[in-house]
Image: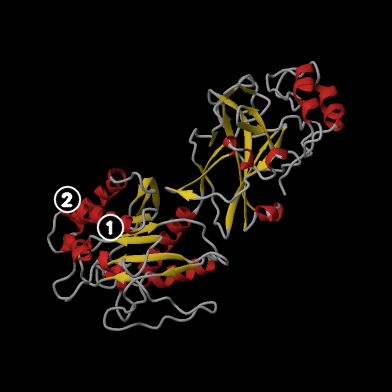
């Protein structure tokens, strides 16, 4: 089990992930730093959780690279069989017997400069898996000092890479008497995600404790056996993939309901409680539904992600995810829970372009790939003609440098022509409700829809590949 608090945590291990555009082919591999103590390193009789995690991520087609100054287990290496044509990547930063403060400042038994800030001079992690704190408690350090040192570890990693995502583990249990204090530490680890949450990306708390049995899942009451390593690997894998899932924040205006600076919400009484994009041409089967439509909502929209290298080839074969959302009067697209941050359950191979669909406006696609900043892929179609692929052919200047999607596509075929008049407007004219020919979205189909919008926009067509 793992959860997000706008920061996340894990027991002995913290996973920190920094995301840009992750690719299995064209971009650089995602760098993953396994950071911890003996539970991360393992000995010569055990492969460590790193090996089953490595296999799982290969199965997920994630292009990644373990990094770290260490390549050995304690007292030598076990046999790590090749997997699907790959040789095990041995790099890690697991240090047998080390406490969190020793990760920060070095161990007295190891001469020279061997500690985190020095190691980071040789590599930059995008994801850090942190499972630290067990030795601190076992060796008599306090929960308070350990929490502070875990914070310093995260700060050190962020100083090296401000975009790093942190997967911080709540620690696996032990059969030692110290387990009671470890439980106390685990209870406070989620607070780290809150206390140092901003402005960096979220900290992910990964619960490595729940479901782990110190008797059956370790070989000595402390270190994972094969069963325990598999359990840890699965939780790390699940957390990594969710952390890599894109989160979008998108703004767009619709020409029809736009009024100087905002859009009207005249459809508020007729907007359906379930998403309306089941029919062709969208054929979207999502189950998005609400018990009430939030105040300030203009309409449902459909977001679509396309994964490719260039917008000109971002056709429907590149679609990796879709989601129905609400559009508010200020142009902010919101998830059905009201959040402006839209989460998608997918991985990115190259770059993502976002498409916005609406029932009676021409769709738009971002002209450039979305860039991730502070954990969010943000895009604003409203503040530039060229923000939509196709420029002035794709969206209109609807008010003094404010741009919006083009109204008038009543039959959803991607072009504004006579079919929209004969097939929809003439049929619906004089009626009220949630109708596709209500181009100005005032809940009434009439001449203003035809004269003020459809006639002006005849000849426009979708520029989405």
Mark 1, residues whose alpha carbon is within 10 Å: few (<14), some, or many (≥20)? some
Q: Is the residue under label 1 in contact with that under label 2 (CB below 8 Å)?
A: no
Mark 2, residues whose alpha carbon is within 10 Å: few (<14), some, or many (≥20)? few
The residue where tag 2 is placed is: 144
User: Does the rendering let one see residue 169?
Assistant: no
In the rendered structure, the answer to whether residue 465 lies left or right of residue 246 reads: right
Q: Secondary structure at mark 2?
A: helix
The residue that appears at 16% across and 76% down in the rendered structure is: 111
* 61 over 299 or under it: above or below: below
In the rendered structure, the answer to whether residue 236 lies left or right of residue 99 reads: right
The residue that appears at 30% across and 84% down in the rendered structure is: 76
In the rendered structure, the answer to whether residue 218 lies left or right of residue 448 reads: left
In the rendered structure, the answer to whether residue 111 lies left or right of residue 172 reads: left
Q: Secondary structure at mark 1?
A: helix
Q: Which mark is residue 156?
A: 1
Of residues 138 and 68, the one nearer the viewer is: 68
């Amino acid at each position: 089990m793992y959860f997000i608090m706008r920061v996340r945590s894990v027991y002995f291990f913290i996973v920190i992930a920094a995301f840009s555009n992750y690719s299995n082919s064209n971009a650089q591999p995602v760098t993953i730093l396994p950071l911890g103590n003996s539970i991360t390193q393992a000995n010569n009789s055990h492969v460590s959780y790193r090996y089953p995690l490595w296999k799982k991520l290969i199965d997920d087609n994630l292009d990644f690279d373990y990094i770290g100054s260490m390549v050995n287990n304690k007292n030598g290496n076990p046999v790590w069989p090749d997997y699907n044509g790959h040789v095990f990547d041995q790099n890690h930063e697991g240090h047998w017997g080390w406490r969190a403060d020793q990760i920060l400042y070095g161990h007295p038994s190891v001469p020279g400069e061997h500690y985190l800030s020095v190691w980071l001079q040789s590599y930059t992690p995008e994801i850090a898996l942190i499972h630290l704190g067990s030795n601190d408690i076992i060796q008599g350090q306090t929960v308070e000092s350990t929490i502070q040192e875990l914070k310093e570890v995260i700060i050190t990693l962020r100083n090296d890479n401000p975009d790093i995502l942190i997967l911080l583990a709540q620690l696996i249990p032990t059969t030692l008497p110290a387990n009671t204090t470890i439980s106390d530490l685990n209870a406070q680890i989620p607070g780290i995600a809150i206390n140092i949450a901003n402005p960096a990306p979220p900290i992910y708390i990964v619960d490595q404790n729940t479901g782990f049995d110190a008797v059956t899942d370790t070989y000595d009451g402390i270190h994972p056996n094969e069963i325990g390593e598999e359990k840890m690997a699965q939780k790390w894998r699940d957390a990594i993939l969710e952390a890599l899932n894109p989160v979008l924040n998108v703004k767009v205006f619709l020409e029809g309901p736009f009024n100087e600076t905002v859009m009207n919400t005249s459809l508020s009484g007729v907007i359906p409680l379930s998403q309306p994009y089941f029919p062709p041409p969208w054929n979207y089967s999502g189950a998005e539904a609400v018990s009430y439509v939030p105040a300030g909502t203009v309409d449902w929209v459909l977001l679509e992600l396309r994964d490719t290298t260039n917008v000109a080839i971002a056709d429907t074969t590149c679609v990796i995810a879709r989601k129905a959302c609400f559009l508010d009067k200020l142009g902010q697209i919101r998830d059905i829970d009201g959040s402006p941050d839209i989460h998608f359950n997918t991985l990115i191979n190259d770059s993502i372009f976002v498409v916005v669909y609406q029932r009676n406006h021409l769709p738009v696609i971002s002209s450039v790939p979305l860039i991730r900043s502070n954990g969010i892929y943000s895009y604003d179609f409203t503040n530039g003609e060229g923000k939509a692929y196709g420029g002035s052919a794709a969206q209109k200047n609807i008010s003094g440098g404010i741009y919006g999607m083009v109204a008038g596509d009543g039959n959803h075929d991607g072009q504004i022509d006579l079919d929209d008049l004969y097939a929809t407007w003439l049929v619906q004219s004089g009626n009220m409700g949630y109708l596709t020919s209500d181009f100005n979205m005032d809940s009434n189909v009439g001449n203003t829809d035809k004269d003020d919008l459809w006639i002006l926009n005849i000849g426009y067509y979708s520029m989405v590949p």
